Image (tube, grey):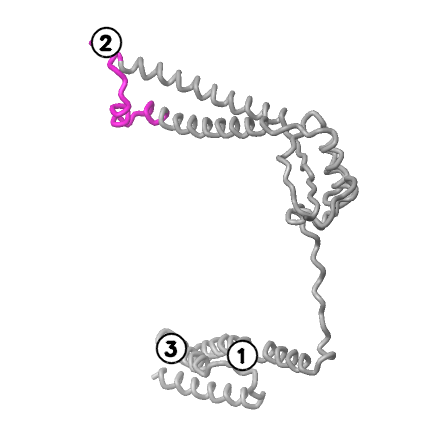
Amino acid sequence: MPGRSSLTPVYRRFEALNHRLLLQVQDEIVQLEQELESLDAEDTMSRYGPMGCAPASRRAESMAQGDLGWRKHALYMDIGLKLAQYSKLIESFRTMQSLPTPSALEVGEYKAFLARTMAICEPETRFLQVENDLISLPRQEWEETGRPGSPNDFDWRDQPFKQIMPPTPAPPVQLSPRLDPALAGDAKDSAAQVHEPRSKSPLHLVYAAFLAVAIPIAAFTVVHGLGERMVIVLLVFSGVATAVYQSGLVAEQGFVECVGCAGLYGMLMAGLAHVFAY
């Protein structure tokens, strides 16, 4: 059978902090309790009548929809939250107190383990110096290939701690495409797919042409001067042409074709402006 060894992890108990936190929450609950007593006294005074003091009733208080009822309801909610927090702290601290205190040998072995493996930096291991505030988790054993002869013989690579703090993975190896013609071809195909311009739908050009014609015609119904209409045509053409150029719809067209289209558009809109003037 393979040898078996164990290492006891050691941690801080934080007993003083637990006490301070419990005292803090306890005092907050005491203050809420005093507020509730004050509201109860106020409620008792409000229930006095000619026949004496009426019995308290939560349902009647809720139906009354008074300010006192809302204040007590909110206070009950705060008390419930604080009591739940206080109960969890008590249970957690009681569990912490039940854990055993490590022996000097266990503390020394754990110090040697942290120093040997360099799992954490040296300042973060100084908690082991607070010997009266340490706890040890239940000892767990594991199988290993050989039995160590001393605490310094622990091989951290064979211990469960590597699951908690895994070693830094090595960077991936990058192969040059020139080492393999097939890889080089794949790289060229991928680059071509990345840099290939997206196909533009002709429908977008139809939309642009429609707007370039429809907007000036709509403006002609308001503006009657021929010169003012041509100014509107020029402004609309500039805006649509800029949007079309930036979108890449005419990236493959030559300069002569673009100038020809602009000239045809200008003559068309000049004719329409003249026609709508009458």
* Left or right of residue 79, residue 1 in this image: right
Q: Quadrant of the C terminus?
A: bottom left
Please tell me which residue is depicted at 72% across the width and 73% down the height of the picture.
Answer: 175
Residue 20, position in %: x, y? 59, 23
Please tell me which residue is depicted at 24% across the width and 14% down the height of the picture.
Answer: 54
- Per the image, is 86 magenta? no
Q: CA distance from mark 3 to mark 1?
A: 37 Å
- Per the image, is 49 magenta? yes
Would you say residue 80 is visible in this rendering?
A: yes
Circle 1 SS class: loop
Q: Earlier in the sequence, mark 3 or mark 1?
A: 1
Disc number placed over residue 52 in the picture, else none:
2
What span is in magenta?
Answer: 48-71
Q: Earlier in the sequence, mark 2 or mark 3?
A: 2
Label 3 sits on what residue type? Phe
Label 2 sits on what residue type? Gly
Disc number placed over residue 16 in the picture, else none:
none
> Closer to the observer: label 3 or label 1?
1
Residue 9, position in %: x, y? 67, 37
Would you say residue 227 is visible in this rendering?
A: no
Foreground residue among 54 and 237:
54
Foreground residue among 39 and 103:
103
Badge 3 is on which residue? Answer: 220
